[in-house]
Amino acid sequence: MSANARKILLVAACALIDADGRLLIAQRPEGKSLAGLWEFPGGKVEPGETPEETLIRELREELGVETREACLAPLTFASHSYDDFHLLMPLYVCRRFEGIARGEEGQAVKWVRAKDLRSYPMPPADEPLIAPLIDLLG
């Protein structure tokens, strides 16, 4: 497939930060592509949806937490080519949310320090997001 014909997939991701300055990562479940790898919560932006609306929906569905658009601040983005599509992924920071984050879809979740993110195997598209998070959080 030529690069021009490759589909661009827009996925929004969130660096959910707790009061202790830790980030939440979730493990991709068995049966999904890249199973076992750790990633930032989020998901595919549906037609007619903004990235912020996607994150509000996904955080509620995946983790059982509520937030608002005003609590989501864009930080950086990833642009990564996979074999059959190109992923464009804005990363938002969220420090204000309600509820206790838990894997609502059976996925493992973990709160980690930004400087420790490289200890967790992540999808290739997520890896460039680590440095800006370390810059932000130390």
Image (spheres, grey):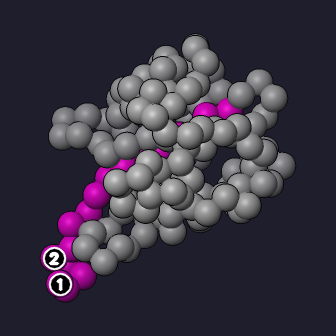
> Along the line of sight, which residue is nearer the eye, 10 or 103?
103
Q: Residue at x 60, y 58 (%)?
A: 129
**What's the amino acid at mark 1?**
Met
Q: Is the C-beta separation of discs 2 and 1 under 8 Å?
A: yes
> Along the line of sight, which residue is nearer the eye, 11 or 75?
11
Q: Is residue 5 magenta?
A: yes
> Along the line of sight, which residue is nearer the eye, 6 or 41?
41
Q: Identify the disc placed on residue 5.
A: 2
Magenta range is 1-17
Q: Can you say which quadrant of the picture contains the N terminus?
A: bottom left
Residue 32, x across and y down, in percent: 35, 54
Q: Residue at x 19, y 85 (%)?
A: 2
Q: Is residue 4 left or right of residue 130?
A: left
Badge 1, how many Cα within 10 Å: few under 14, some, many 20+?
Answer: few
The residue tagged 1 is: 1
Q: Residue at x 78, y 34 (%)?
A: 21
